[in-house]
Image (cartoon, rainbow, N blue to C red):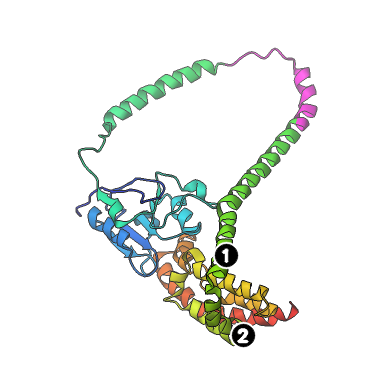
Amino acid sequence: MANHKTVIVSKGKNGWGGPLELTPTDEKKYVISVTGGGIHPVAREIARLAGAEVVDSFKNPVAKEQTLVAVIDCGGTARCGTYPRLRIPTVNVKVMSPSGPLAKFMTEDIFVSGVTVGDVELADSETTVAAVPKTELDEAEVKNAEKNKETVAAVAEPVEDNSTNNEIEGNKGVMGIIDKIAKGAGSFMNIMYQAGRDTIDTIIKNIIPFMAFVATLIGIINYTGIGEILANVFVPLSNNIGGLIILGVITALPFLSPLLAPGAVIGAIIGTLVGNEIANGNIDMSIALPALFAINAQVGTDFIPVGLTLGEAKPETISVGAPAILFSRVITGPLAVVIAYFMSFTL
């Protein structure tokens, strides 16, 4: 039997959530690294201290039933909420707090962010709170259950109904219709209200910060003059279909795209630059659509193993599917640029 130990993973500087207490078992013995570019040092350290096995989930997918903890590097909302939704402890090496449509699954008992190697340590046995013996706990639960059962039985005695049958039958038709209408309207309003709350939450936590980021990025580019420097490099590729195809091939390279995808920083920078050049008249407006596909060929490539896991694909399917999709992007990425170019004639 492996020498399993309990590991405490705490949030890093400016991080959120945790701490997580992780103890490997014979069933849950794998620390998966879903970071791209191999096994992350944090995942390796957790496995080393806990006596668990660490794997690169991009190359060797692991079933969720065998996963002890998932180490991710997501600055967005996809992987951050996916593993907590499956109730898999999640360690994010990037600094972030719950956001996006899966934010409700990212709770402190299952998620921690901003983690570095220094935030991983063995549990101190002296400070570990002793658990209540199972036999004592079971006996107490049985006694409480019997007491509650007696109380419920006493309260639930039938009460004599003094209303006449005629009154019941007379109210059943009219009041039944009114009751159904009221319940239906209440349910509809509740759904719409919750949808509004989720929409506002998404706007505040995702869209507005991104707008602020883009505005700041444009300001920095214009103020520092770096826009002119970058323009000399990217404009030759961005103002003609040949250059855009080359750019699409570069962003879709299988060994590069999973590294470019997290946070979409490269796409945001190039997109802001191209958009700024279009606004200034240096690039024709018809280039906007193919440029959009050229700079986003890498989108979602870091999410492929996660998406296949959500689809409950077998580990063998994931191990074959991930590289297959990555290599297919080299073909579909530039092809999308060409299609967009011809479609842009109507712009």
What kind of element bears circle 1?
Answer: helix
Q: Please state the horizontal and vertical placement of residue 22, each as a whole percent of the image.
A: 30, 48
User: On the image, numbered disc 1 is attached to which residue?
Assistant: 219
Q: Is residue 331 visible?
A: no
177 shown above or below 212:
above
Quarter of the picture containing the N terminus is: bottom left
What kind of element bears circle 2?
Answer: helix
Q: Which class describes the residues within 10 Å of circle 1: few (<14), some (14-19), or many (20+)?
A: few
Q: Please state the horizontal and vertical placement of residue 155, each as a whole percent of the image.
A: 53, 16
Residue appearing at x 37%, y 45% in the figure: 18
Q: Does the stretch in magenta take in 176?
A: yes
Residue appearing at x 56%, y 55% in the figure: 209
Q: Does the stretch in magenta take in 308?
A: no
* For marks 2 and 1 on the same chain, the one whose residue lies earlier in the sequence: 1
Query: In the depicted view, which residue is nearer to us: 152 or 94?
Result: 94
303 shown above or below 134:
below
137 shown above or below 218:
above
Q: Which residues are magenta?
A: 158-178
